[in-house]
Amino acid sequence: MQTVRAALVAAATVLVALVASIRPGAAEEGSRLALTISIDGAIGPASASYVKDALAKAGERHAAVVILRLNTPGGLSSSMREIITDVLSSPVPVVGYVAPSGAHAASAGTYILYATHIAAMAPGTNIGAATPVQLGSPIPGLPGGTPDKGDKKDGDQPSVKDAMTMKTTNDAVAFIRSLAELRDRNADWAEKAVRDAATLSANGAMQAKVIDLIARDEADLLKQVDGRAVEVAGKTQHLATKDAVIEAIDPGWVAKSLAVITDPNVAFVLLMVGIYGLIFEFMSPGAVAPGVVGTICLLLGLYALNMLPINYAGFALMLVGIALLAFEAFNPTVVIGVGGVIAFVLGAAMLFRIEAPGYRLSWSVIAIVAAMMVGLIVVVLGALRRARKGPVRLGAQAMRGLPAEVLDWSETTGHVFTNGERWQARGTETFKSGEMVEVANIVGLTLVVRRAGATGQGGPA
């Protein structure tokens, strides 16, 4: 009995030791996991969705740190703010890293880098030019701005455009300064990046205390951040990343799909395919494919436009142009068609409110679509011209001159076969069965025939 009891105690001791040895190992493995997120290109809805999902996955896996690699010319401010919100609320420390060498974090990328818990850059990279894309130039009357052409007199009120520009700039300055103060970085240079579109190299950013360190690669970055204290969700954490395993998080199918359809050119093409697919469906109700494809493309295009900053006046002009071109197809004229093309091109040019990097509607795409519309008008007008100059194909005029074969004949009446049909006929002469005659006239449902080549009036009416 004592032997059994001793064996049980020994087994329990071994089991506890195994569990104790396994659990710390698992915790240590979780604390040594470094996940990487890469934003390479313009920042938009797809990027925001990708970062949100990746940070959620990093929290579920209890990663020690998330490395947010940046190489971007900027993008949409709405998507930038979504990413910053997710970074600030992330339960896992986020290290912003501008890489590889030759990369840059311009415009929206500067704001995101300022929001990360630790900011780093690779050698040969740069940061800055954070002026809001709606502005495009320094603001007159503000620090670093240039005066308008024609100096304004004292007491002149700023225009509505200047007031909106000033409001947008001040909002951007306040936002980036708040991020700089949160992370204890250079707020004065951040304001200069917004007002004057200032930029810095990696070494310049390090000297100006815009970033925390310069790292050659991810492995070097993890060694340098090891042991640093960061504040995450109101609590101070000490990073343990020296021997962390680096694992990349790739975008999911939702983010990849959004990246495709939220491209303004793709959204524009989807919209056109959808609208014209429905037009062709209405013109030929028996054709199912144009309607199905058109409906799917139209819904995808509208969904993409809903996520992009569009100008509804431009969208309305596009619809007016398409409606005029559709009317042109049913009632060919020159004025309506030309007006439709002009309205469409103007609407397409006005479609997007801003021209953020990577979110510009290509003039080549607009030109190609407009050329296709002009080609449609030319085809329709050409068909109309040929129809007017061609022989009449309806009524009595269409029947005159057609050859006919005599089926049977008795004195001055009989039956003939012409144009694929059997007709009752009459004439002033006697014909034989199988003889070829010519239709001279039609009276009611009776053909007046004559011998082929005759030039008479075709008998009495």
Image (cartoon, rainbow, N blue to C red):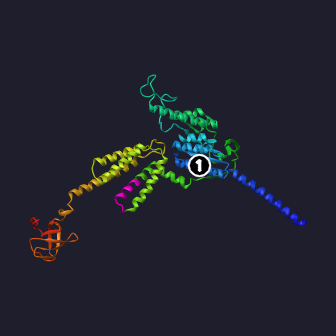
Mark 1 is surrounded, within 10 Å at the Cα level, by few (under 14), some (14 to 19) or many (20 or more) other residues, namely some
Which region is colored magenta?
273-286
Residue 413 position, x and y percent, is 13, 73
The residue at which mark 1 appears reads as 52
Q: Quadrant of residue 392?
A: bottom left
Q: Is residue 324 above or below residue 150?
A: below
158 to the left or right of 408: right
Residue 28 position, x and y percent, is 72, 52
Residue 248 position, x and y percent, is 61, 52
Judged from the image, the secondary structure of the residue bearing numbered disc 1 is helix
Q: In the image, is residue 192 part of the stretch drawn in magenta?
A: no
- Residue 294 seen from this side: yes
Q: Which residue corresponds to the image point at 54% horizontal and 36% vertical from the top-left?
A: 172
Q: 226 or 214, which lies in front?
A: 226
Q: Is residue 321 above or below residue 140?
A: below
Q: Is residue 221 above or below residue 151?
A: below
Residue 190 position, x and y percent, is 57, 35
Q: Which residue corresponds to the image point at 37% horizontal and 58% vertical from the top-left?
A: 281
